[in-house]
Image: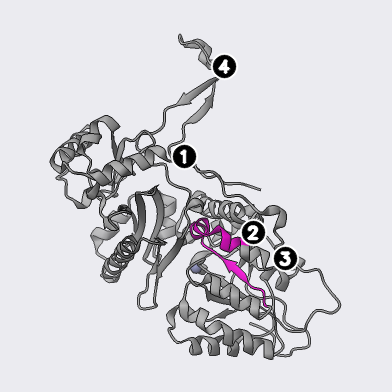
Amino acid sequence: MRRSRFFIAGIALIAACLTACGVATAACTKDVVVPTNPTAIRFVNPAGVTGLTTRTLYNDGSNTGHIHLSYPTFSGAPALNGALAREALRQAREFRVIADAPRSPADDAAANHGNPRVRRKAAGARPEINMEWRISAYSPQVIGVRLRTREFVKGAWHNSQRTLWYDRHARKATTSLGLISDKATFQRIVHDKLREQGAMPTLTDKMLGSIAFNADGGLITEFDDCEVIDCSRGRVAISIPREQVHPLLSGLGRLAQAAALAQRVPTPTPTPAATATQPQAAEPEASQPARRVALTFDDGPGPQTGRVLDELRAANAHATFFPVGLNATAQPRLLQRMVREGHAIGNHSWAHRDLSKLSSSRVMDSLGHAQDALIAATGVEPELVRPPYGEIDDEVREAAKRLGATLVGSSVRSEDWKESDPEVIAARVVDSVRPGSIVLLHDIHRPTVDALPAILRTLTARGYELVTVPELLGADGLRPGELVTAGPPDQDTEDGDV
Ligand code: ZN
């Protein structure tokens, strides 16, 4: 089985000395340290940040595109949390305007750039915006959050990033330029560095919206796709050495630089594998209850997930969670609780992008990266994959097969995310459930969580046992790379499911 890896940017690589080095004049050493890329940011491991949770801005049903904007929130940092939420909202609003605009021949020409295979896959696909976050720095004085956005509109992808900074003593959030005191000199240096790369931009404040520091204290400025240079160049970033940039920094900038310098290499989250007791696929039993249903919760963990677990425990019910890998890194303890309390966990990709628009290697990266995050948090290897938006193609099937995971759809789509009334959600679910149903819900959607007590009460009263997906399917029902949308209906029931 393939294992993808965490690539921690900024860590020097060790390259083995090859016999071919004997031809060089320099003495051959056993190991060669490859210099760290000066534009690589060493991000903070979220598992070590207390009081961290995630929020997601998602499609409310009023737009035809896929919207999934994830951002972190920190306890005791309301100004930063507010700034992150406003940034997500701004991006979602701008996306809606662009995605709803008619497509022109110029758009088609722009869409013809890039990887031809990806272009073929993306042809005619729905518009999409996806935002993921990383913590650029975290210390008692400062927090830096980098928001990376990928937009698919009019047939082409566009990547951009913003980094917001927070002064924990002053309790103020700022854009990246808040790190700079001598802006004129800073702009001149950035301009000269870009000229060395062949770019001649007129720099604006927006272009200087993503600033962080490397492990040596050097400043990194990243630019959006096509912003300062030809689109074909991919990621464009410049670095300014520590000594050169230090006089240009504000007080907050110096604290941010110190935080980057002090940051240790992230250590993996301790895994509670020895105590994990994720239920395995049920062996056939003579006395299985007649009616079984599997509730599934996607896109968490979020602020409501703890309440979902409380309600399930109170009802003696088990469920299956499909967390987004990125969110899982922020709240490993919630995932550990899921496993401890008998729930199953499946893979819902790393950052909730529509996998059917990505190349096969990126599909594998997304699912593999999420798989690693879930294993790191719980010590248990997920055996289920639910692709975001239910979008499945051959590459997704192949990636799931390589992970040894069954693709899980649903037979009851509550469309809870479009609904604000918990009573409507509860009624829709309980009216649609049949023995063997797999019910799609979202633990990031507050009205769904409000509806959960009524759903559990009604289904239990109707004689349903609430089980995990592996329990519902049984060992024979798990087939890596194949899509399953429901479990076997009760044999005594005439109106079988789906
Ligand atoms: Zn989802």
The mark nearer the N terminus, 1 or 2, is 1
Question: Real-space Cα distance between discs 4 and 1?
Answer: 34 Å
Label 1 CA crowd tier, 10 Å (few <14, some 14–19, many 20+): few
The mark nearer the N terminus, 3 or 1, is 1
Label 4, on which residue? Answer: 19
Q: Is residue 245 visible?
A: yes
Residue type (three-letter) at the residue carrying disc 4 = Thr
Q: Quadrant of residue 125?
A: bottom left
In reply to whether residue 197 is colored magenta, the answer given is no
In this view, 459 is above or below 219:
below
Mark 3, mark 1: which one is toward the viewer? 1
Residue 214 located left or right of residue 301: left
Residue type (three-letter) at the residue carrying disc 2 = Pro
Q: Are marks 4 and 3 in contact (CB under 8 Å)?
A: no
In reply to whether residue 330 is colored magenta, the answer given is yes
Q: Nearer the viewer, residue 325 or 155?
A: 325
Label 1, on which residue? Answer: 264
Residue type (three-letter) at the residue carrying disc 1 = Arg
Q: Nearer the viewer, residue 479 or 34?
A: 34
Question: Real-space Cα distance between discs 4 and 3?
Answer: 50 Å
Question: Real-space Cα distance between discs 4 and 2?
Answer: 41 Å
Q: Position of residue 242 (x, y in %)?
A: 29, 32
The mark nearer the N terminus, 4 or 1, is 4
Label 2, on which residue? Answer: 382
Q: Are marks 1 and 2 in contact (CB under 8 Å)?
A: no
Q: Secondary structure at mark 1?
A: loop
- Specify the label residue 279 is tagged with: 3
Give the magenta-colored segment's residue range.
317-336
Q: Position of residue 436 (x, y in %)?
A: 69, 80
Question: Real-space Cα distance between discs 1 and 2?
Answer: 30 Å
